[in-house]
Image: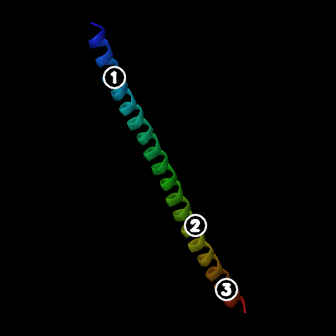
Amino acid sequence: MPLMVKAASIGGSILVILALLVAVLKGVITLIAFVTGAIKLLLILAFIFVFAAVGYMVFRSWQARKTT
């Protein structure tokens, strides 16, 4: 019986270490995906802001030219 317990403890330890490694890797991949998504969202918002700013500047210059 002690031989089976020793063998099960070694195999069980390896399985637990592998399970913990997989869990950590899943967490890291999730974190990287979240950060990448946040960066993509910020880039999209920056382009929308630039597009709106250019449109506002064109509208103001068109209004200024219209009044003169």
Picture layout, residue 52 above or below residue 66 = above
Label 1 sits on what residue type?
Answer: Ile
Which image quadrant is residue 57 in?
A: bottom right
Q: The N terminus lies in which quarter of the figure? A: top left
Residue at x 59% of width, y 77% of height: 55
Residue 9 or 24: which is nearer the viewer?
A: 9
Q: The C terminus lies in which quarter of the figure? A: bottom right
Residue at x 33% of width, y 28% of height: 15
Q: Mark 3, residues whose alpha carbon is within 10 Å: few (<14), some, or many (≥20)? A: few
**Residue tagged 1:** 10
Picture layout, residue 53 above or below residue 4 = below
**Residue tagged 3:** 61
Q: Mark 2, residues whose alpha carbon is within 10 Å: few (<14), some, or many (≥20)? A: few
Q: CA distance from mark 1 to mark 2?
A: 54 Å
Residue at x 42% of width, y 42% of height: 25
Q: Mark 1, residues whose alpha carbon is within 10 Å: few (<14), some, or many (≥20)? A: few
Q: CA distance from mark 3 to mark 2?
A: 23 Å
Label 3 sits on what residue type?
Answer: Ser
Count all numbered tags in the image, as a single digit: 3
Q: Secondary structure at mark 1?
A: helix
Label 2 sits on what residue type?
Answer: Ala
Q: Secondary structure at mark 2?
A: helix
Which image quadrant is residue 47 in?
A: bottom right
Q: Position of 35 compared to 22: left or right? A: right
Q: Position of 60 compared to 17: left or right? A: right
**Residue tagged 2:** 46
Q: Position of 60 compared to 10: left or right? A: right
